[in-house]
Each structure stands twice: as structure tokens, then as C-alpha cells.
Image (spheres, grey):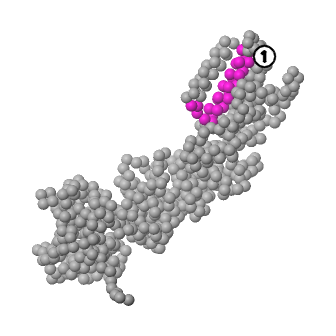
């Protein structure tokens, strides 16, 4: 070994790194300097509690002063101050944080929080300043005030200062390109963004410009419903009221405070971007904390605040850490617990929120096995069944004012409207409203009619004919019409392998068919059954080789009330097409290969057969009644198609022309 020593980092290199690489936004300097000022005040309180300071604490305050003539911005506090030795130790040694050392010595209560974790915060001021000065006086008896200055080079000056009151003033002489920070409105905006909830009054031009009170740090018992709603309106102005909220408060196995709100979801919501604000000791850090919030809960809104969430040195982003994952699991569990309790205690309210909350629950079930097990019994679906007494009568209980998890236990709260329409699933329901059921209840209710089979609808409007057909024969249909349900149905099949899920337009259950009225009487003239004649009539009129035509007699007490024809899309083939379209990021095209079911019991179809049989061939081998029958076959097919897909421009043009021709021919007759 020729030589052994230590590696020396040249301080000339640290300032370019700070100015260009450490912080993404120059405006962060204000957050860092104000945070240091708050820390200084909190430290003085802790020293006073320890009996080491007997002077007057005074009213804690931070003052921001702007001087456009001198191009200076100053931030003053009446906190603990520093001696010359402390300035050398904490300011001259870049990246040394006094917060950690101080906490170890003095902190005895979780109420006294120190913000700082990184010594580089002060040096963020060099991003905007050509010169930085410090005037500070320590709280210690007989201390000499000192003045420190640096122009961004490794050279600094340290001398006595005339300051007479304990505390610190940081003065920045701003760079020419940073003059925006001399505008009062800009400073107000930055304080509101980063420092609004810091627990010390921040003054500008003699006016306090921050709120100071952080609701998520308050005891839930001290907050009213209006407090929570007012806080939501402050965070998200001009938005609809939230559906419900949860107040998080735990200090084991990690420290976490927060308030999370369930918003009403908009159709254009981006489920990949979070809207929850991340704070650290009431200091705003980021609008995005996707690493902390489970993916399926990203559309939630609100605030989380934790000193245990590991941030990078600039406090601008999260680092991957086991604690982050544990916090995410904790949040998911508390949301699941909250929903289960609401389901048990206030079914009306649960149903009222389901249209929005259901998306969270289903998405969570798809992505989180633990959450899936929590909520599997409270997944509900709107149903065509008339459930006026779906649940046994249970006593109605009051819901506590807020949800909080703490050492004392869990308490929950949701936003409850003054009047909520009664639900058929409610223990005290008196007014019929849309019925909801669980899958377990559905299967139990229908096991005698169609065991382990579920009929569902994905579009109440376009599939209305099919739904009505099922309802008239006593078949219960579930509505699975949210944007996530196309994926969720496959998930349900995986969870319930013995259950078959059939969309109402995929096939016709035998319950819907009248086997005794199939019309299988053979016509002696043609030696064909009526069904065969109808099938041949439509095949010739439509001339679509890939179209499968079936003839069935739909069961009904009123044949006129059933559809004359229906288009069916087999379940398996339809899903394959939807999956392929999703993978290729294309729209689902209507398949050429589909099934047309012609209802032989409908009077229109019976009249059509008679019309075609009464054809009289005229010149050029054409029959006016035969032409009309062909037009009507096409028209019936068009009407059946309209329940499945919209026409394009050419298709709509042809449909209108054929409709006019049919009406013209009928009026001629």
C-alpha cells in the first residue's frame, strides 16, 4: 500500500449542483427558509420547556420583508437563534442538519415537531440570490449577535452584528432574473402553496397570510362536519361536495395523519394520477404521492402528512421504501373497513354512494388481494328484481362524526345528506328506489330457476328489449354498466368458476322460448315447416352468407309486445373481439358473423309469411308483394341491429330510404 487517506469534496463544486440540480423549482427556496424559521421557533419552545431558557418567549412570528430598491427579500423569526460557533457548525458545513441532533437532545413529545431533515435547505437560497446574509442572536445569556454573508462562492465572512433580540434574519439580495420574488402577490401565492398550514403566523406587510391550523392535525372530536367540508372546498374549489371522508391518525408502526375524501367521479377522471396532497410536518411537498396511495385509490382527494415517508434530499419526491408500502396497505385497509361499516350500518347511504364508490371497490378488488377479501361481501349490483325486503330488520344506528384510527380505536364518519331517499335494502325502507343485491344473494334467489347462471346487462338503453324479455319471463338481470365492468365480469368468473355469466343479448335461455308453439306444421305445397319458410324468406331477402338466421317462438302472453327479431352476439366470441380491440387500442367493430333470431310468434312475422305466399308475379318476373316482403325483412333486420350498434352515415342513409319505401308501398296498398 503506497498511501491511505480520505477523499475530500471540493466545496467549489457544491453551489453549481445546488443551483442547477438539487431543486427542480427555484421557488422552493421560500419553503425551505420559512421551514427553518418555524424550526427555530419550535426549538426555542423545547429549550424553554427543558428549563434552559427563562426569558420571554413572546408571540411566535415570522416576518417577510420586500425591498424593491435594494432588491432584497428577508425572512425573520424570533426563535432560538445561533452563536458564532453554531453558525460555523450548521451553516458552513454544507449538508449537515442540526435538526437530527437537536431532536435527539430535546424532543420528548410528539407535539413538538421539527421540520428539518436536511442541511441543504438553507443553501437553496443561492438558487435565486447573488448574496445571502444572516443576522442572528442566540437565546443563550450573554451571547453575541453575529453577521454571516456569502456571495455564492466558498468564501464567507463572519463578524459581529448589532441585532438585539433573539432570533434570525435571512436577507437575500436577488439575482436580476429572479425579481418576481419581490412582488407581494407572488410571495402570498408561495406561502399559500407551501406554508399555509405551518403552525406559526407568517406576516407580510403587517398582515398574517397563512391559515396556520392544519385540520388533519386536529383531534377529530374538535372538528365538525362543516370543518371537513370547508377544508375540502379550500383544497378543491368549485367541486361537488365529497361523498364521505376518513380521518387518519396513527403513530404506530409509523406516524401518519391525514384526511381522505371520496369525490364524485367524473367520466373523464384520470385514474392514473393522484390528487392527494403530500405534507411533511405541515409543509407542503407535492401534489402527487402515487407511491403512497394504492393505485385503485388514486382518485381519492385530501391530505396525508407523515414524517416517516422517506423523501429525497430536496423533499421533492418519494423514495422506494418498505414504510411507503406499509402505509399504502394501511390506507387500503382503513378504506375497506370504512366501507364495510357503512354497508352494515347505513345501507341507504352506501347505495347512494355506490355509483362512485363502486368504481374504487371494483378496481381495488382487481388489483389488491387483501382488499378484495375485505370487500367481497359488500359488492352490490343494480337488479331488475323487486327487492322490497332484501335484508332482515336491524336497528338503525347513528354514525359517529369522523373516522380516525388511533390507540383508542377506530371511529368513522361520512357526509350524510339531510334527506336521503329510502332504499329497498334499507331496514326501514318505505319508498321503492333502484334495487341492489350482492352476487351471493342473486345466486341464492335464483338457484331453482337457473342455478349458477347470471344474466347481466351492460347498456340499459340499447339492451332494453332484451332486458324486458327476461323480466317478463321472471328472469332476474343484473346491470353491470360501469366502464370497469367489462373487466370485472371476467374477474368474477375467475372467482366463481362454477358460475356462468351471460349477457342478455348473447343467447336465449330456454325459459324464454315456447317449445309448444314452434310452428312445425309442414305445408303440403312446399313440404316445408313454417319456421323453414321464414328462415328461407329472410335468407333470400338479406343475402348475407355470414349471417346465421334462427327461428324461435318467444314465450309471451302478448306476442305483440315481444320483438319480431333480435340480434345475438355469442358471449365467448364477443369477449374475444373486445379483448383484441383493447390490446390493439381500437374500437370494437360489429362482427359480420352474428345471429338473427326471428320470432315466429310475432304477428308481424306471421303476416309477412302470408304476404310472401300471396305474391303474384308480374312483368320481368317481379312480384310487388314479394318486393314488399323483402323490404320488410330488411327493415325488421335493421330494427334488430339498431339495438346492438349505431349506423354509420351510409347505413343510416340506406335505412331511411328503405323505411320510406316500406311506408310508400304500404300506403299504396
Examine the image and state in which quarter residue 132 appears: bottom left
**From the image, which quarter does the N terminus lie in?**
bottom left
Q: Is residue 189 above or below residue 639?
A: below
Q: Is residue 122 above or below residue 486?
A: below
Residue 75 lies left or right of residue 557; in this view the side is left
Inspect this view and state whether residue 411 appears: no
Residue 422: x and y, percent? 55, 47
Residue visible at 33% across and 77% down in the picture: 100
Q: Residue furthest right?
A: 524
Q: Residue furthest front?
A: 2
- Give, as a single range, the part of the protein colored magenta: 623-648
Residue visible at 74% across and 31% down in the picture: 599
Q: Badge 1 is on which residue?
A: 614
Nearer to the camera, 2 or 367: 2
Say whether residue 557 is magenta.
Answer: no
Residue 109: x and y, percent? 36, 76
Q: Residue furthest top?
A: 619
User: How would you classify the magenta stretch by its main secondary structure?
Assistant: helix
Q: Secondary structure at mark 1?
A: loop
Nearer to the camera, 24 or 43: 24
Inspect this view and state whether residue 263 appears: yes
Q: Residue furthest bottom?
A: 1
Q: How many marks?
A: 1
Examine the image and state in which quarter residue 313 appears: bottom left
Residue 657: x and y, percent? 60, 21
Residue visible at 77% across and 13% down in the picture: 616
Residue visible at 66% across and 31% down in the picture: 640
Say whether residue 643 is magenta.
Answer: yes
Q: How would you rate the neighbour count of disc 1 (Cα within 10 Å): few for under 14, some for 14-19, many for 20 or more?
A: few
Q: Is residue 216 above or below residue 657?
A: below
Amino acid at each position: 500500500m503506497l498511501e491511505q487517506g480520505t477523499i475530500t469534496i471540493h466545496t467549489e463544486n457544491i453551489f453549481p449542483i445546488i443551483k442547477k440540480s438539487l431543486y427542480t423549482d427555484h421557488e422552493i427556496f421560500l419553503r425551505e427558509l420559512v421551514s427553518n424559521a418555524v424550526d427555530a421557533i419550535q426549538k426555542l419552545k423545547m429549550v424553554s420547556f427543558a428549563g434552559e431558557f427563562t426569558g420571554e418567549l413572546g408571540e411566535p412570528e415570522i416576518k417577510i420583508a420586500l425591498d424593491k430598491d435594494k432588491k432584497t427579500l428577508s425572512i425573520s423569526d424570533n426563535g432560538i437563534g445561533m452563536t458564532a460557533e453554531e453558525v460555523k457548525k450548521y451553516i458552513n458545513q454544507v449538508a449537515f442538519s442540526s435538526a437530527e441532533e437537536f431532536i435527539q437532545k430535546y424532543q420528548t413529545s410528539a407535539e413538538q415537531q421539527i421540520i428539518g431533515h436536511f442541511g441543504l435547505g438553507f443553501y437553496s437560497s443561492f438558487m435565486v440570490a447573488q448574496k445571502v446574509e444572516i443576522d442572528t442572536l442566540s437565546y443563550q445569556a450573554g451571547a453575541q449577535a453575529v453577521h454571516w454573508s456569502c456571495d455564492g462562492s466558498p468564501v464567507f465572512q463572519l463578524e459581529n452584528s448589532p441585532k438585539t433580540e433573539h432570533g434570525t434574519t435571512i436577507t437575500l439580495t436577488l439575482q436580476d432574473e429572479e425579481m418576481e420574488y419581490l412582488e407581494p402577490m407572488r410571495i402570498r401565492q408561495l406561502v399559500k402553496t407551501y406554508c399555509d398550514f405551518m403552525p406559526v403566523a407568517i406576516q407580510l406587510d403587517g398582515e398574517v397570510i397563512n391559515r396556520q391550523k392544519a385540520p388533519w392535525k386536529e383531534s377529530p372530536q374538535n372538528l365538525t362536519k362543516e370543518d371537513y367540508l370547508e377544508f375540502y372546498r379550500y383544497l378543491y374549489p368549485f367541486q361537488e361536495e365529497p361523498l364521505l371522508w376518513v380521518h387518519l391518525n396513527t403513530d404506530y408502526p409509523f406516524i401518519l395523519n391525514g384526511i381522505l375524501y371520496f369525490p364524485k367521479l367524473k367520466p373523464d377522471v384520470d385514474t392514473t394520477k393522484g390528487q392527494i396532497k403530500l405534507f411533511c410536518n405541515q409543509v407542503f411537498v407535492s401534489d402527487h404521492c402515487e407511491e403512497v396511495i394504492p393505485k385503485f385509490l388514486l382518485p381519492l382527494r385530501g391530505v396525508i402528512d407523515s414524517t416517516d415517508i422517506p423523501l429525497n434530499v430536496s423533499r421533492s419526491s418519494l423514495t422506494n421504501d418498505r414504510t411507503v408500502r406499509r402505509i399504502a396497505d394501511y390506507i387500503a385497509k382503513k378504506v375497506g373497513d370504512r366501507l364495510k361499516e357503512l354497508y352494515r350500518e347505513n345501507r341507504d347511504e352506501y347505495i347512494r354512494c355506490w355509483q362512485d364508490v363502486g368504481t374504487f371497490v371494483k378496481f381495488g378488488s382487481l388489483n389488491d388481494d387483501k382488499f378484495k377479501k375485505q370487500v367481497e361481501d359488500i359488492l352490490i349490483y343494480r337488479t331488475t328484481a323487486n327487492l322490497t325486503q332484501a335484508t332482515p330488520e336491524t336497528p338503525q344506528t347513528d354514525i359517529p362524526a369522523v373516522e380516525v384510527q388511533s390507540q383508542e380505536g377506530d371511529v368513522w364518519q361520512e357526509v350524510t345528506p339531510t334527506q336521503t331517499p329510502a332504499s329497498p335494502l334499507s331496514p326501514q325502507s318505505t319508498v321503492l328506489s333502484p334495487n341492489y343485491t350482492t352476487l351471493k344473494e342473486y345466486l341464492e334467489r335464483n338457484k331453482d330457476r337457473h342455478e349458477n347462471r347470471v344474466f347481466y346487462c351492460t347498456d340499459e338503453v340499447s339492451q332494453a328489449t332484451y332486458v324486458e324479455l327476461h323480466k317478463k319471463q321472471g328472469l332476474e338481470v343484473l346491470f353491470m354498466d360501469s366502464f370497469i365492468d367489462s373487466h370485472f365480469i371476467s374477474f368474477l368468473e375467475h372467482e366463481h368458476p362454477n358460475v356462468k355469466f351471460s349477457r342478455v343479448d348473447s343467447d336465449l335461455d330456454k325459459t324464454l322460448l315456447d317449445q309448444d308453439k314452434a310452428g312445425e306444421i309442414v305445408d303440403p305445397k312446399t313440404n316445408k315447416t313454417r319456421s323453414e319458410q321464414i328462415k328461407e324468406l329472410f335468407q333470400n331477402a338479406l343475402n348475407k352468407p355470414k349471417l346465421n338466421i334462427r327461428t324461435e317462438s318467444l314465450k309471451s302472453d302478448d306476442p305483440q309486445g315481444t320483438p319480431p327479431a333480435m340480434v345475438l352476439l355469442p358471449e365467448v366470441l364477443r369477449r374475444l373481439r373486445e379483448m383484441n380491440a383493447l390490446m390493439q387500442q381500437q374500437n370494437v367493430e360489429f362482427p359480420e358473423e352474428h345471429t338473427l333470431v326471428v320470432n315466429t310468434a310475432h304477428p308481424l312475422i306471421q303476416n309477412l309469411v302470408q304476404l310472401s305466399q300471396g305474391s303474384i308475379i308480374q312483368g320481368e318476373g317481379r312480384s310487388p308483394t314479394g318486393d314488399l316482403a323483402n323490404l320488410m325483412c330488411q327493415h325488421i333486420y335493421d330494427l334488430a341491429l339498431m339495438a346492438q350498434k349505431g349506423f354509420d352515415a351510409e347505413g343510416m342513409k340506406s335505412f331511411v330510404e328503405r323505411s320510406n319505401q316500406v311506408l310508400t308501398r304500404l300506403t299504396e296498398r
